[in-house]
Image (cartoon, grey):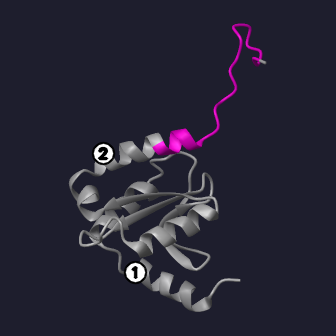
């Protein structure tokens, strides 16, 4: 069962997104990743993910620039999300603001690797065994 306080906190966060988070959200909301629906400020267990998709199970975090990449809290959070089956990708505000296309290209390759391969067809149009 979800913590109602956490859900209300997530709703409030949606109204005050940082500029880097807003830039990312505009790309995710524009369905740049075909067939994937992202949610912002999604409650997952005891945590709120910046952006999350249920299929494939992917979390995208936009971290502040003063945020230490090796921060213990992030490590605990990432391990928790991974234990729930999510793949977690983190980008800094600077990455998003100065190299958004590079971040999106990286995410495209991450998403492609997470999707199951399409069945191959023989030259006769039959599925290969």
SS under mark 2:
helix
Residue at disc 1, secondary structure: loop
Q: Residue furthest left?
A: 98
Residue 102: numbered disc: 2
Residue in the image at 33% along x and 65% along y: 69
How many callouts does the rendering have? 2
Q: Position of residue 107 (x, y in %)?
A: 43, 47
Q: Which residue: 63% across, 59% down?
A: 85
Residue 15 bears which disc, if any? Answer: 1
Quarter of the image with the C terminus in it: top right
Residue 56, compared with residue 14, is above or below; it is above
Task: Indicate the position of residue 99 as horizontal and vertical percent values.
Answer: 24, 50
Tell me the CA gap for discs 2 and 1.
27 Å
Whether residue 92 appears in this view of the structure is: yes
Q: Quadrant of residue 127?
A: top right
- The residue located at (39%, 55%) in the rendering is 27
Q: Is residue 68 left or right of residue 33?
A: left
Q: Residue furthest top?
A: 123
Of labels 2 and 1, the one closer to you: 2
Q: Earlier in the sequence, mark 2 or mark 1?
A: 1
- On the rendered structure, is 37 left or right of 93? right
Q: Which residues are magenta?
A: 110-128
* Depicted 87 relative to depicted 4: above or below: above
Q: Position of residue 114 (x, y in %)?
A: 57, 44
Residue 70 drawn in magenta: no
Q: Nearer the viewer, residue 76 or 96?
A: 76
């Amino acid at each position: 069962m979800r913590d109602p306080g956490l859900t209300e906190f997530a709703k409030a966060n949606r109204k005050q997104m940082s500029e880097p988070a807003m830039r990312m959200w505009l790309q995710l909301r524009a369905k740049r990743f075909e067939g994937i629906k992202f949610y912002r400020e999604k409650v997952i267990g005891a945590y709120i993910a910046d952006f999350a998709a249920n299929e494939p199970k992917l979390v995208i975090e936009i971290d502040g620039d003063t945020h230490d990449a090796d921060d213990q809290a992030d490590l605990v959070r990432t391990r928790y999300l991974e234990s729930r089956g999510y793949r977690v990708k983190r980008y800094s505000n600077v990455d998003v603001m100065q190299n958004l296309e590079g971040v999106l290209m990286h995410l495209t390759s991450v998403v492609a690797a997470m999707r199951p391969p399409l069945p191959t067809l023989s030259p006769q149009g039959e599925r290969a065994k």
